[in-house]
Image (cartoon, rainbow, N blue to C red):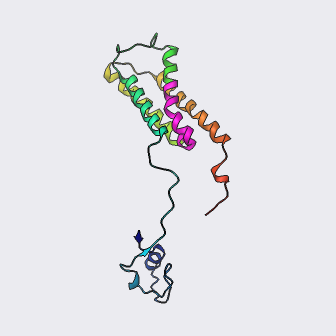
Amino acid sequence: MALLCPRSLKNIYLGDINPQLECCHIRQPRTFLHHIGQTHALPTPKKPTRSMKPTLANVLTLAIAFVIAYGALTPPGAYNLTTGPASLFDKQQHITAFALLVLPLTWRHFRTALWLVPLAILYGVTIEALQPLIGRSASGLDIVANTLGAVLGCLPGAVRAKLRPSQSAKPYDP
């Protein structure tokens, strides 16, 4: 791929138009007009370390988010797994669901917890805010259970990140 030489463009932008300077890639005298419209082949960049391909962790997280939305926004009476409005079993479901929501991504890259946990909490609050619109009751205890689940779901990833050797500890090899 042909691109304008970044080093030469920097010199031009800084006002360096001395015709006796050498071009950074072809080692020959250049002039200001030499770089206008002229391209040089640059080495191909290294492959990025993180891929933008959908990973299993991404797919699992999205699938769990859809299951949570379906379960929380289904009209009442469609199913009844709880024994009462504030039952312990209901809160266990909230904790488990939100722990499973954050677990795949925080297991893969623990640093995603910095943005994923607040996003999961916001997701839980949004679901609780939408529940009265479909005939269900919103509960502050559900929000607390969702938050607790999101935080607990990060713990396996934190332990894994602590036990695994640090990526920054590797010697630099260009």
Magenta segment: does it hold 102?
yes
The residue shown at (50%, 79%) is 24
- Considering the image in quadrants, where does the C terminus appear? bottom right
The dominant secondary structure in magenta is helix
Quadrant housing residue 158: top right
Furthest residue toward top: 83
| Total numbered labels placed on residues in the image | 0
- In the displayed structure, 29 sits above or below 66; it is below
Furthest residue toward bottom: 20
Q: Is residue 127 left or right of residue 97?
A: left
Quadrant housing residue 31: bottom left
Taking depth in this image into account, of 90 and 125 the one nearest to the observer is: 90
- Considering the image in quadrants, where does the N terminus appear? bottom left
The residue shown at (67%, 40%) is 163
Give the x, y percent position of residue 74.
Answer: 35, 21
Give the x, y percent position of residue 25.
Answer: 49, 78
The residue shown at (55%, 41%) is 108
Quadrant housing residue 41: bottom left
Residue numbers of the magenta segment = 95-113
Q: Is residue 2 left or right of residue 161?
A: left
Magenta segment: does it hold 48?
no
Give the x, y percent position of residue 83.
Answer: 46, 10
Give the x, y percent position of residue 123.
Answer: 43, 33
- In the displayed structure, 163 sits above or below 52; it is above
